[in-house]
Image (cartoon, helix red, strand yellow):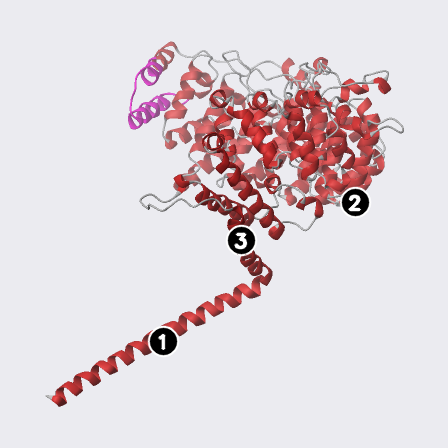
């Protein structure tokens, strides 16, 4: 199965809210496309929950006909504000007057297919006073407007307009009163709004407004599945929803808590319906994300969503043993599996511990094999918080890597490896288990990387002993992601993978580099803790192909990484090849950056000076890295340039590297010398320059080794020396004054 993370229909059917035909995103992962280009229709037969069917069978809301005179008036207003250019104040005045005319007719206008567009423009262009007046006037009917196909757009435009004024602290209380009236009306019939395809979308925007989060943000409409996956696999820094309040300071935290509590209190009897309804699931996911970090509220909300009885909640019991079987069944439903993913993401550690011990224990592999349940397991693994959590997960899945690959659940394996790398737990076991899952008995390690690159192709092959590199197949997305994680491990754990990737034939390396995922794998290896010699073994295979590679959309990054880990002779080969395509390369997106970093123009004009500069830089980097870099042997074998991959590298190292570059550039490039000074050119002397840099490094090292005491002592010495200097200046001035006075008195006596 290719990329099973995208295979589940996240959120079910698209909402189709846009009145002009294009569908407006209603689900966090609605109709996600598979990595192999297909769509999963597994749940198309379950598009609507039982409650949704009951709701749609009810008598629909009958819109009142808008008075012809009123319709004509608003049509004229539409022509005025949309057909001509008018200044902001005049536009606000026109919009405000028109909204006053809409008083008492808000519902009719908002739910009219044509006039609702005009009403949206009026709400976006009016003053805050008129906006709040309009919302107060229709607050009792706000749920009805929100659940209408046209009215939902009007409601969202109004909420977005309110959000635009949140930065103005003077009007904070006015906005709060308006939002309060909307919330009070919404919680009167929360189930209807939550289970409606239009109302659920508006309700999620209201939750974001209460939190103070931008309504169009990822927290409101859900992150793309690729972003979620990258964060779970440590391939992208996670912008945690726990820090969402830092992104937007203004909000109404008390109103948010009130809205969520009252929604759940009003829907307590229908909680089983909300658990499996696709639209209410999205609302509850958003509510949880908005409460992320607020453990007190989460401890109240999560048990309700899990279906716990009030008696257990009051007694402090989270999960009843009788509810465990029901929860495991619910996790195999699309809507609840999404909700459970978010619950695990935001759950306080006490809740996570109980869920892992009571619900998931002894059922993790069974859930991992299910097309919906496996996403819950991925979330469970990715949000493990300590060694004990990893121990329990490993106990059930550590020996099941091959089984998971065979049923297409490579995402679960990737989550285990990523969590092991993040927690520094079971690192050796993870690497060994992965290698064993793609290896036959008594087989060379050279096949490990190729088989992971083509996971599906390999596991679907009947005669695995005769499997060969498929030249016409696309690389497996999850397989390439797994290898990127593997090359983040310390080199002593991944020697088999290093041996395998450095054993690739030149044609296979080129094939990998022309695949987006394969190129990321090669780059991950070049940025790993493998020795410089091992990296250069792979780079040499690309001799004669650098110019073609640099013109490839993603090849420029790879060429730069190859240059960084190469020795001087190989760097010269790379730049020589790029000279032939310098003109074409300068016209590509990444080409100018690559030409500048490699100094291709400098090599073309002064090749000997370019070599001298590179030699000086490399020597300086090695000396500096020997002084300030880690003490591990494997790290010292690397080129200093390749170490920029590690985010833990101190900021002062980056500053020193920049200083080295500037120093070398000043010595070797006359064009960098200060203008107006005619100084003779100094011949490049790497040995002499290295002595200067060594002296600087030793001085810095001695300061660093001295610790904070030396810093304090040096500051104290500076203060004393400054005081002493001032004292000496005063004495000198006094002595000078006395001498002057003495001389003048002698002159008087003589006269």
| SS assignment at label 2 | helix
Task: Out of 609 and 525, give the one closest to the viewer.
Answer: 609
Q: Residue furthest bottom?
A: 749
Measure the C-alpha gap from mark 2 to mark 3: 52 Å
- Residue 83 included in the magenta stretch of the image: yes
| SS assignment at label 3 | helix
Instruction: Write down the region rendered in magenta.
Output: 76-105
Q: Are marks 2 and 3 in contact (CB under 8 Å)?
A: no
Q: Looking at the image, can residue 147 be seen? A: yes
| Residue labelled with disc 3 | 691
Residue sitting at x 42%, y 27%: 134
Residue sitting at x 66%, y 15%: 37
Label whose residue precedes the other's in the sequence (2 or 1): 2
| Residue labelled with disc 1 | 728
How would you rate the neighbour count of disc 1 (Cα within 10 Å): few for under 14, some for 14-19, many for 20 or more? few
| Residue labelled with disc 2 | 388
């Amino acid at each position: 199965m290719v990329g099973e993370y995208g295979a589940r229909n996240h959120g079910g059917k698209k909402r189709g809210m846009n009145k002009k035909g294009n569908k407006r995103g209603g689900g966090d992962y609605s109709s996600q496309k598979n990595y192999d280009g297909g769509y999963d229709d597994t749940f198309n037969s379950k598009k609507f929950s039982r409650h949704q069917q009951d709701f749609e069978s009810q008598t629909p809301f009958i819109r009142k006909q808008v008075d012809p005179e009123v319709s004509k008036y608003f049509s004229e207003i539409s022509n005025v504000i949309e057909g001509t250019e008018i200044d902001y104040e005049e536009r606000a005045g026109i919009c405000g007057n028109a909204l006053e005319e809409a008083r008492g007719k808000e519902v009719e206008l908002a739910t009219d297919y044509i006039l609702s567009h005009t009403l949206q423009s009026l709400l976006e262009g009016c003053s805050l006073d008129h906006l709040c007046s309009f919302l107060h006037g229709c607050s009792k009917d706000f749920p009805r407007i929100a659940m209408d196909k046209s009215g939902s757009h009007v409601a969202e435009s109004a909420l977005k307009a309110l959000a635009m004024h949140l930065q103005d602290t003077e009007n904070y209380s006015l906005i709060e009163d308006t939002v309060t009236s909307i919330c009070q009306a919404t919680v009167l019939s929360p189930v209807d709004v939550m289970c409606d395809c239009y109302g659920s979308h508006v309700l999620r925007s209201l939750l974001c407004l209460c939190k103070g989060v931008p309504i169009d943000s990822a927290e409101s409409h859900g992150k793309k599945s690729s972003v979620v996956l990258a964060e779970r696999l440590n391939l992208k820094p996670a912008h945690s929803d726990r820090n969402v309040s830092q992104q937007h300071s203004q909000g109404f935290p008390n109103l948010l808590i009130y809205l969520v509590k009252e929604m759940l209190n009003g829907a307590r009897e229908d909680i089983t319906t909300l658990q499996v309804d696709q639209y209410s699931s999205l609302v509850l996911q958003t509510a949880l994300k908005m409460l992320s970090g607020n453990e007190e509220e989460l401890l109240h909300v999560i048990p309700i969503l899990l279906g716990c009885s009030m008696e257990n909640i009051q007694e402090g019991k989270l999960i009843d043993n009788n509810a465990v079987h029901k929860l495991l069944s619910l996790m195999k439903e699309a809507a609840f599996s999404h909700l459970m993913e978010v619950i695990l993401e935001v759950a306080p550690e006490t809740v996570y511990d109980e869920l892992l011990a009571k619900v998931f224990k002894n059922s993790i592999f069974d859930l991992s094999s299910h097309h919906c349940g496996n996403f819950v397991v991925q979330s469970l693994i990715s949000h493990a918080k300590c060694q004990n959590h990893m121990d329990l997960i490993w106990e059930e899945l550590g020996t099941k890597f091959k089984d998971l690959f065979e049923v297409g659940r490579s995402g679960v394996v990737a989550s285990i490896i990523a969590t092991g790398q993040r927690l520094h737990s079971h690192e050796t076991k993870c690497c060994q288990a992965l290698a064993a899952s793609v290896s036959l008995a008594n087989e060379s390690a050279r096949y490990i990387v190729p088989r992971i690159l083509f996971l599906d192709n390999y596991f679907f092959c009947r005669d695995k002993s005769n499997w060969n590199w498929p030249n016409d197949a696309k690389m497996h997305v999850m397989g390439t992601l797994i290898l990127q994680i593997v090359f983040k491990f310390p080199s002593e754990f991944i020697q088999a993978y290093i041996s395998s990737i450095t054993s690739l034939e030149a044609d296979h390396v080129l094939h990998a580099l022309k695949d987006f995922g394969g190129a990321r794998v090669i780059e991950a290896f070049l940025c790993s803790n493998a020795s410089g010699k091992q990296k250069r073994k792979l780079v040499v295979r690309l001799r004669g192909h650098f110019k073609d590679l640099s013109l490839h959309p993603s090849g420029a990054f790879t060429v730069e990484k190859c240059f960084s880990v190469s020795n001087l002779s190989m760097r010269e080969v790379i730049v020589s090849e790029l000279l032939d395509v310098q003109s074409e390369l300068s016209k590509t997106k990444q080409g100018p950056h690559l030409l500048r970093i490699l100094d291709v123009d400098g090599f073309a004009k002064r090749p000997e000076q370019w070599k001298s500069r590179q030699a000086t830089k490399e020597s300086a980097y090695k000396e500096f890295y020997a002084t300030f870099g880690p003490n591990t042997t494997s790290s010292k074998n690397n080129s200093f340039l390749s170490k920029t991959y590690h985010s833990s590298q101190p900021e002062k190292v980056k500053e020193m590297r920049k200083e080295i570059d500037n120093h070398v550039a000043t010595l070797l490039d006359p064009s960098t010398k200060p203008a107006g000074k005619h100084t003779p050119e100094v011949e490049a002397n790497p040995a002499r320059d290295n002595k200067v840099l060594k002296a600087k490094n030793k001085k810095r090292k001695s300061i660093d080794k001295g610790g904070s005491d030396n810093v304090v002592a040096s500051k104290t010495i500076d203060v004393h020396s400054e005081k002493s200097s001032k004292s000496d200046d005063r004495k000198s001035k006094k002595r000078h004054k006395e001498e002057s006075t003495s001389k003048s008195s002698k002159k008087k006596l003589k006269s």
